[in-house]
Amino acid sequence: MIEVNNLYYSYGNDTEYAVKGISFEVKEGEVFGFLGPNGAGKSTTQKILTGLLPLQKGSARVMDVDVSKATSAFYNRIGVSFENPNLYLKLTGLENLEYFASLYDVPTADPMSLLEMVGLKDAAGRKAGEYSKGMQQRLVFARSLINSPKIWFLDEPVSGLDPSTSASIRKVIKEKNKEGTTIFLTTHNMHVADELCDRVAFIVSGEISLIDSPRNLKLRYGKRLVELEYKANGSLIKESISLTQPTDRERLNSLINSEVIETIHSKEATLEEIFIKATGEELK
Amino acid sequence: MRLFKNVLKEVKLGWRSHFFLLTVGLAIAYFLLMTFLIPDDLSTNTNFVLLAENDELASMLHLDYSESQISFSIVESRDEMDRSMNGSFSSIGIVVKGSVSSPSVEVVFQGHEDAETKEFIKLFVSTFLIGPNIEFASERNIEYLQEIQSAPDEIPFNKSFLPIFLMFEAVMMGMIMVFAMVFSEKSQKTLHAYSVTPGKIWEYLGAKVILLALLGIIFAFILTPLVVGFEADYSKLMIIVAVGSFLSTSVSLTVASFYRNLSQSMAAMLALTVIFTLPMLSYFSEGFSPWYLRILPTYPILFALKGAVFPEFSSSEISGLILVAIEAAAAFLIAVTTYKLRLRKG
């Protein structure tokens, strides 16, 4: 669905590249996470893929369309959710969706159903300028679904949302993916990426350093440990035990058999830890 | 269809930004300004107050002034002259003394007259004492280097501002409102959201052009009937305002695209306003119409507006608007191209 080869981009049209020769591919029906700190080149890449920035060097094809030659047909099949709410603040939530729905040449979703889906049904008649930032972000998210896109570009879709709203947005993303929508997710939130993405790419300073599934990355970079808490001689003891060392495995068995264990957790590496290990950069 | 939806959106936004209220308010404000603050006659014709000291001399004053443009009044006493002059700031008193065979004259000035006026009065009085040459002053003996209009220009001074206000608000209303709209949308980044839809830039900008033409027409159709009633040629007026608005909005859209906010663009906006309003010089001083004023697109617009609102005083040069319409279309194409390029620069 998306093919990017040796893509470069410079805002000053010089050799100060914001994106430096990146290549990747996103398969149909996949949730592809593009992860990196602020200023890494995530949004620049997404802007090139959606035609908001020109293609300077390299190639980028979305749904077999060269993005530098994107036509109306192309925009009828993609959806873009921006990180910063870009709404008509003097139009109501419903009017915003109705207006954007009128721009498409393909059948569009019912605006009220979309508002209901993101929990804004009761605020449908209120001006978007009166919404909280979280509500505005949900409206932008709903707007990006108005044309039932084949490829959905999401830029930090849960950034700044409260946990409950974030969970409902993540649920919608999973549902749309189940329905067959290919998703290109740009985020610096590793927990979101871990939960939603089939594959992730780590991008730092405009370069991709790793592409794989979260599971493979954890297996490759993580330590196979369990962390447990147990009572001994009246005090609580915390211990990490390797699952690969024979002596540690025996010790774990004996602790389980002695029935003193109070808590036990597997201790695979988080994506964030892997990111730091793989790129040497902190996520900011 | 998409253009219509864009227009509908712009009308809603314009309504909620009080653009319509502002338009109606300005039209009424300009009407009140023209009616109550600007006088209908700004001429400062000097009124001569004449006094003869005796009856014999009084016969000298009873001449035929019917062809004269100068205003005279004859008084009977010095007190009456003082009262008359105190009531008219531009009056000058002339007291004829002595006898018919040897008259002398005392001229009474207000005190504010300049040296040139005083010299002119002295010359006039000398001529008067010799005896006015009525034959010379007759209209038959006057030759005009330029052909004068068959109907004299009798547009009242206050109403003569109507084409100016129409050009300034109806035609150039776009300029200020476009800047406000563009910068509001820049801060909201709504054009980015529009750019990832199948909507075309020309439809997006075209809707703004239509909204501002609509506001201009509303302004013109409120102010014009209030000032001149039904004497104006309203179909022509609508065409002129629409074409003028198309031009100024398109130019403003292009210029506004180069700036990030209103304060940054202030110098450009003012420069554009000054340039576009320069043809006012020719309007108020008809003999002054150098090429650099005539090439400005607002020049034919202003005079076409004059022709449309005062059809009995001025011919309506609507044919000159064809070139303006072509210029407006070119400006719109430039605006569309500029927006496409600037949008893809991020």
Image (spheres, coloured by chain):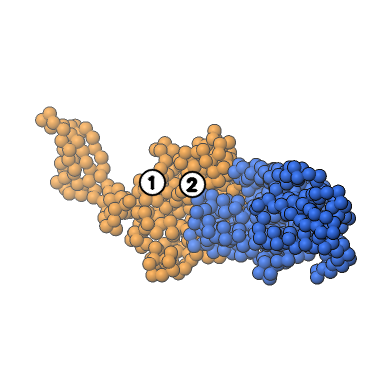
Name the one closer to the observer, A231 or B222: B222
Report whether B342 appears left or right of B295: left
Report whether A114 appears left or right of B212: left
- Above or below for A109 versus B336: above
Q: Residue at x 27, y 47 (%)?
A: A268
Q: Residue at x 23, y 50 (%)?
A: A223
Q: Which residue is mark 1?
A: A192
The answer to which quarter of the image holds residue A259 is: top left
Q: Residue at x 77, y 62 (%)?
A: B126
- Above or below for A21 versus A281: below
Q: Position of residue A132 (x, y in %)?
A: 47, 38
N-terminal-most mark, 2 or 1: 2
Q: Which residue is mark 2?
A: A85
Query: Which hue belongs to chain A?
Result: orange
Q: Few, some or many C-alpha atoms within 10 Å of disc 1 (few <14, some 14-19, many ≥20)?
A: some
Tell me, by letter, which chain the rendering colours blue. B
Nearer to us of marks 2 and 1 is 2
Q: Position of residue A172 (x, y in %)?
A: 48, 42
Name the one closer to the observer, A109 or A47: A47
Q: What's the amino acid at mark 2?
A: Pro
